Amino acid sequence: MGKYVSARGWLECNESTINEVKKIRDDFTANYNEGLMDKDKLELYQSGWTFPEKQINWTAYVFFGADIREYHLDYMKKQLSEMAGIQDIDYD
């Protein structure tokens, strides 16, 4: 079997950065693998991202939540690290 962990949290975006976060998510789905996951697994994990249909006032909250295999945590860390590098973004 394998060990699973619950990965969850959110990013606080403004209107201009939410599209950058989506692009990073899409790029990681299309290009990241390092031989660890097949395409179906990548798409499954990436479906844990939830984007608001419209921004309410000044902050758009992007959520992630999924139970993932422990040895795929590096994938999530790399993706989040790139997202955290976007100017004007906060995360928890």
Image (cartoon, rainbow, N blue to C red):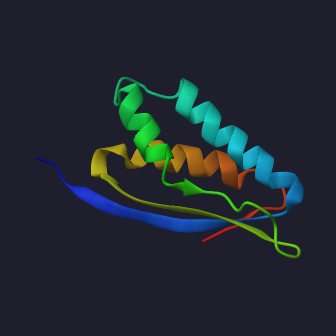
Give the image location of residue 6, x and y in percent. Answer: 35, 64
Q: Nearer the viewer, residue 23 or 78?
A: 23
Residue 19 lies left or right of residue 74; in this view the side is: right
Q: Quadrant of residue 78?
A: top right
Q: Nearer the viewer, residue 16 or 54?
A: 54
Q: Nearer the viewer, residue 16 or 81?
A: 16
Residue 54 lies left or right of residue 71; in this view the side is: right
Residue 4 lies left or right of residue 42; in this view the side is: left
* Quarter of the figure with the C terminus: bottom right
Give the image location of residue 11, x and y in percent. Answer: 67, 64
Who's the residue at 30% across and 61% down the image? 5
Give the image location of residue 46, x and y in percent. Answer: 50, 45
Residue 2 lies left or right of residue 39; in this view the side is: left
Who's the residue at 59% across and 51% down the image? 80
Give the image location of residue 65, x and y in percent. Answer: 46, 62
Query: Exactly how many numbered labels are in the figure?
Result: 0
Who's the residue at 88% across and 76% down the image? 57
The extreme front residue here reads 53
The extreme left residue here reads 1
Q: Quadrant of residue 67?
A: bottom left
Who's the residue at 84% across and 63% down the image? 14
Question: Where 8 sits versus 27, above or below?
Answer: below
